[in-house]
Image (spheres, rainbow, N blue to C red):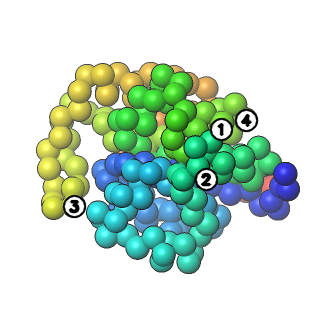
């Protein structure tokens, strides 16, 4: 498998709309990023008004349309220095904690861990009550105790940084990018 000259960020979108707009702004500002969409992410992007064709103009976009999640093979060749899953739905977080890799998102997370590629997970369900942006406007949501517990469990995994806010996401990503710039100098 051919290695790229400059490793990139593999950004994974799941079925969450919570802070989707903010995540997409960060994605657009990154110098080298490829987007990986779970099946649910494709639906959510449309619900929030994103045009997939326009996204494909500015970056590589991989969809969850193969049973074996073929795009994960790009992790094996050194193409990516960091995996970001954000926003990460409670479903994706729970599957990652349980070791289930049956979607593109969870398969990328599992393979990143096996390849020791650092992952940043921006979990959605981070407080007992929070306001989330929905297609029709902001709504209060009340994550279940199991959702909060799974976020805490995932934060203890090797090669995984769990972030709980857009600011923490930006800081963790800046740290990864600065590690890459000093290692390539």
The residue identified by callout 3 is: 135
**Whether label 2 touches label 1, CB < 8 Å:** yes
Q: Earlier in the sequence, mark 3 or mark 1?
A: 1
181 vs 127, nearest the viewer:
127
In the displayed structure, 147 sits above or below 15; it is: above
Residue density around tag 2, few if under 14, some if 14–19, many if 20 or more, within 10 Å: many
Which image quarter is the C terminus in?
Answer: bottom right
The residue identified by callout 2 is: 10
Residue at 52 percent of width and 68 percent of height: 29
Residue density around tag 4, few if under 14, some if 14–19, many if 20 or more, within 10 Å: some
Could you tell me which secondary element the residue under label 4 belongs to? loop
**Whether label 4 touches label 3, CB < 8 Å:** no
Measure the C-alpha gap from mark 2 to mark 4: 13 Å
In the displayed structure, 151 sits above or below 137; it is: above
164 vs 142, nearest the viewer:
142
Measure the C-alpha gap from mark 3 to mark 1: 31 Å
**Whether label 4 touches label 1, CB < 8 Å:** yes
Measure the C-alpha gap from mark 4 to mark 3: 36 Å
The residue identified by callout 1 is: 112
């Amino acid at each position: 498998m051919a290695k790229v000259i400059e490793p990139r960020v593999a950004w994974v979108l799941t079925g969450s709309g919570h802070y989707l707009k903010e995540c997409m702004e960060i994605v657009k500002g990154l110098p080298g990023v490829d987007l990986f969409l779970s099946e649910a992410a494709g639906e959510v992007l449309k619900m929030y008004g994103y045009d997939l064709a326009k996204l494909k103009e500015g970056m590589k976009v991989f969809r969850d349309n193969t049973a074996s999640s073929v795009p994960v093979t790009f992790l094996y060749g050194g193409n990516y220095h960091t995996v970001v899953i954000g926003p990460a739905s409670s479903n994706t977080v729970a599957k990652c904690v349980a070791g289930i890799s049956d979607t593109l998102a969870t398969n990328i997370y599992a393979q990143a861990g096996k390849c020791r590629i650092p992952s940043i997970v921006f979990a959605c369900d981070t407080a007992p009550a929070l306001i989330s942006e929905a297609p029709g406007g902001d709504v209060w949501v009340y994550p279940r105790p199991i959702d909060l517990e799974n976020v805490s469990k995932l934060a203890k995994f090797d090669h995984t940084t769990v972030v709980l806010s857009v600011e923490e996401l930006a800081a963790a990503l800046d740290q990864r990018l600065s590690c890459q710039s000093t290692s390539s100098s």
